[in-house]
């Protein structure tokens, strides 16, 4: 074999999916290829060949744009253009053009079909989109068990129809219904409408302990604002909802009609519901010292969840729900010590907690939004409350924010009027500091807000930001600065020297770029959600992002995030402090390949967003 053929073979062997071919097949492959050269600006793939072909980029780059001229993808060294060989695929809906002088290897589709018969792993690559490949890779990474809350749906746990009564039923008769059916809760129906629910605890606390006559209607003791799940909800998602709300029962809907009830007991039949009971312990804690002891168990929970097949979003929801509970209990303990607040206030959280994407332990980001009724004499109360909660969180492992974004900083403990002024200034004057603060404060979520102060703040902020294209353009430019760690030859760029030699920061170089993209998409469409996956899905629904783009970013986020939590769980198992610095040596060759694909996707989406708003900054 001459030198040129050897060089082609070595190139193919280092790029998926050709690295999955048997050695003898790979050795013969270069002779089946032809080489073509395209000058910059040439339409791609070419329409001149007599037969359909697969194109393998050896050098150069190809940009793919939709009918509106927006960048939707980019091909570079090692990428494939396989559309002509996918007879069952729809028209691509995009136009390709070489962005620079480009050299490609060309393989007729008939030859590709013969190759696919030589290797199942090679063939699978051409059966799946990037999104499907990442999703399949995620299934391998999490090693999901066949049973348990990660896979079982609520439908499989609801064994009976709903036991109900009307709002006018007496408390005594409602208790009889519960006793006759051996249930600990009762759904209250007003015709077809779910009006509320009562539990054994409600009978004890709201009737017997309160001395309420049992002939009173059950509507007087029922809980009215209920969170429900549907039949297709995963058991783990139902568990998270119970954990977040500190409840043990959830109504189940099917086609918007009440179909039954699920309890924490139902969940424990499938898997130990650790987080539900942790939250129960948190709400019963009567001191910071007790909360510290409880919080020490959460690292074990994270390891347990990862071992049980949890993805990054599952872990993020569980840990964030526990952090929410700890924060809420600290607020209650603070009010018990300081007395009732002089005016209404909202405790809001930021960062990964606000997005429900936490891992253990994160630093804290929080603030206070106080009613405009506050007087100067009220300030010491809120200063003391903020210090109590911030100190308590730090003691529980949520260390003080390095950037001092905490409620005990007077700057972030302000009235609603001042907060509105903050956001208006950031939007109208998008200077570097304003953009940095926007990345923090546009992810806020209220945790304690009895007067709904945050709703007013968020509504105004979303209206102002969506209407200001210049601000969005600056946010977009800021969001695309942090690129994935890919080098010129598509190798993963590593840190050299220091404590993190031969690693890369998977959080800040892989996860944060997707978070930043989702934030810009959500601001563009005025989306109130803070969770990154929910933002991407909502952006696609509102047309701010293509459905394929959203699905690909969601799958990339789950894959990269799950590699991160697996890395952290292994560190926690070894008694080490969890961090975000991952070595490629921890990954299989296939995982490294999928990770590079995810990074390339992020890079392409960043370029697309940057080009979309490039001119908007100067409009």
Image (spheres, rainbow, N blue to C red):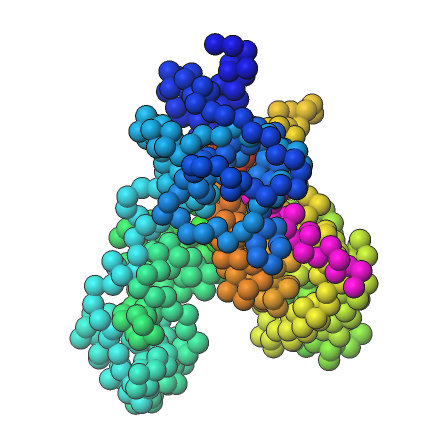
Q: Can residue 333 be seen?
A: no
Percent across and percent down for residue 89 are 40, 48
Work out which residue is located at the far left of the displayed protein and give it.
180
Instruction: Residue at 22% x, 71% y: name it.
Output: 161
Instruction: Residue at 71% x, 45% y: name it.
Output: 481
Percent across and percent down for residue 542 are 54, 66
Instruction: Residue at 27% x, 82% y: name it.
Output: 165
The region drawn magenta spans 598-619
Percent across and percent down for residue 584 are 54, 27
Q: Is residue 114 above or below residue 88?
A: above
**Count of number-bearing discs:** 0
Q: Can residue 481 be seen?
A: yes
In-front residue for pair 434/42? 42
Q: Quadrant of residue 68?
A: bottom right
Q: Quadrant of the C terminus?
A: bottom right
Q: Is residue 336 above or below residue 516?
A: below
Q: Is residue 477 left or right of residue 394?
A: right
In-front residue for pair 504/487? 487
In-front residue for pair 336/575? 575
Q: Quadrant of residue 78?
A: top right
Instruction: Residue at 67% x, 38% y: name it.
Output: 40
Q: Is residue 116 left or right of residue 279?
A: left
């Amino acid at each position: 074999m001459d030198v040129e053929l050897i060089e082609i073979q070595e190139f193919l062997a280092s790029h998926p999916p050709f690295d999955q071919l048997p050695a003898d097949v790979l050795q013969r492959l270069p002779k089946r290829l032809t080489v073509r050269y395209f000058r910059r600006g040439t339409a791609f793939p070419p329409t001149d060949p007599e037969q359909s072909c697969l194109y393998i980029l050896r050098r150069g780059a190809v940009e793919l744009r939709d009918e509106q001229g927006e960048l939707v993808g980019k091909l570079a060294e090692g990428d494939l253009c396989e559309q002509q060989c996918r007879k069952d695929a729809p028209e691509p809906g995009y136009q390709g053009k070489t962005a620079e002088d480009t050299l490609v290897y060309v393989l007729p589709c008939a030859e590709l079909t013969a190759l696919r018969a030589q290797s199942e792993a090679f063939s699978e690559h051409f059966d799946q989109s990037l999104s499907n490949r990442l999703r399949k890779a995620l299934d391998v990474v999490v090693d999901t068990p066949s049973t348990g809350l990660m896979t079982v749906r609520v439908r499989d746990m609801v064994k009976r129809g709903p036991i109900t009564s009307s709002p006018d039923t007496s408390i005594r008769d409602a208790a009889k219904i519960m006793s006759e059916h051996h249930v600990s809760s009762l759904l209250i129906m007003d015709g077809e409408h779910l009006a509320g629910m009562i539990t054994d605890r409600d009978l004890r606390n709201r009737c017997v302990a309160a001395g309420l006559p049992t002939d009173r209607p059950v509507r007087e003791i029922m809980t009215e604002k209920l969170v429900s799940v549907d039949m297709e909800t995963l058991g783990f998602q139902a568990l998270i909802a119970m954990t977040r709300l500190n409840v043990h029962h959830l109504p189940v809907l099917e086609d918007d009609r009440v179909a039954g009830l699920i309890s924490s007991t139902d969940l424990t039949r499938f898997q130990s519901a650790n987080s539900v009971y942790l939250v129960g312990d948190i709400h019963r804690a009567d001191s910071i010292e007790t909360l510290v002891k409880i919080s020490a168990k959460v690292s074990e929970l994270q390891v347990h969840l990862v071992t049980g097949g949890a993805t990054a979003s599952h872990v993020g929801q569980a840990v964030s729900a526990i952090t929410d509970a700890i924060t809420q209990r600290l607020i209650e303990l603070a009010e018990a010590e300081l007395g009732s607040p002089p005016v209404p206030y909202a405790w809001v959280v930021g960062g990964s907690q606000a997005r429900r994407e936490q891992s253990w332990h994160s630093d804290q980001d929080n603030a206070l939004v106080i009613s405009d009724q506050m007087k100067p004499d009220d300030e010491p109360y809120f200063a003391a409350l903020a210090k109590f909660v911030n100190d308590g969180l730090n003691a529980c492992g949520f260390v003080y924010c390095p950037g001092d974004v905490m409620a005990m900083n007077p700057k972030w403990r302000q009235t609603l009027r001042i907060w509105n002024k903050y956001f208006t200034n950031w939007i109208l004057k998008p200077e570097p500091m304003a953009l940095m603060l926007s990345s923090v404060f546009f992810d806020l979520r209220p945790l304690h807000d009895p007067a709904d102060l945050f709703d007013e703040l968020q509504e105004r902020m979303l209206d102002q930001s969506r209407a200001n294209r210049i601000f969005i353009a600056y946010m977009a430019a800021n969001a695309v600065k942090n690129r994935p760690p890919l080098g010129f030859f598509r190798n993963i760029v590593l840190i050299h020297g220091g404590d993190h030699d031969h690693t890369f920061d998977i959080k800040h170089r892989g996860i944060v770029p997707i978070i930043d993209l989702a934030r810009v998409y959500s601001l563009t469409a005025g989306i109130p959600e803070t969770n990154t996956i929910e933002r991407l899905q909502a952006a696609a629904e509102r047309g701010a992002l293509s459905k394929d783009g959203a699905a690909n970013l969601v799958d990339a986020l789950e894959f990269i995030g799950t590699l991160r939590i697996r890395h952290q769980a292994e560190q926690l198992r070894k008694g080490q402090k969890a961090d975000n610095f991952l070595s490629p040596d921890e990954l299989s060759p296939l995982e490294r390949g999928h990770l590079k694909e995810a990074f390339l996707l992020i890079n392409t989406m960043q370029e697309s967003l940057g080009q979309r708003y490039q001119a908007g900054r100067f409009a």
